[in-house]
Image: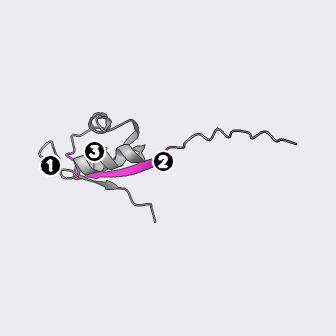
Amino acid sequence: MLKTKQKLNIKKQEIVMNIYVGNLNYNVSEADLEEIFTEYGSVDSTKLIMDKFSGRSKGFGFVEMNDESGRKAIEALNGAVLESRDMVVNEAKPKQ
């Protein structure tokens, strides 16, 4: 007796990378970060960390994008100058 094989349609899941972006000028916005990182792939989210008392940026934030695009962005943007400051761009470490 012959058995038919069922084809499994496994959708490739994208791994999302959380990227730390530091040493930012206080005037940089989330929209600015998204515009810069979009050159390397689709951006899932951007988040600038704000001081809760002054409402001003703390000079760092996070960008989420897929793993492959994230690695390209890190390689290209780490040390790049944005508004007279050398950005620090690397894979974010998990909270401890």
Tally of numbered discs? 3
Sequence-earlier tag: 2 or 3: 2
Which is in the foreground here, disc 2 or disc 1? 2
Kind of residue at disc 1: Arg
Q: Is 72 within the magenta? A: no
Q: CA distance from mark 2 to mark 3?
A: 31 Å
Residue placed under numbered mark 1 in the picture: 85
42 w.r.t. 77: above or below: above
Residue placed under numbered mark 3 in the picture: 56
Q: CA distance from mark 2 to mark 1?
A: 30 Å
Q: Which labelled disc corresponds to residue 15? A: 2
Kind of residue at disc 3: Arg
Residue segment shown in magenta: 14-26
Q: Residue furthest front?
A: 1
Q: Residue at x 88, y 42 (%)?
A: 1
- Given residues 78 and 85, the one toward you in this image is 78
Give the x, y percent position of residue 20.
Answer: 33, 52
Kind of residue at disc 2: Ile
Q: CA distance from mark 3 to mark 1?
A: 17 Å
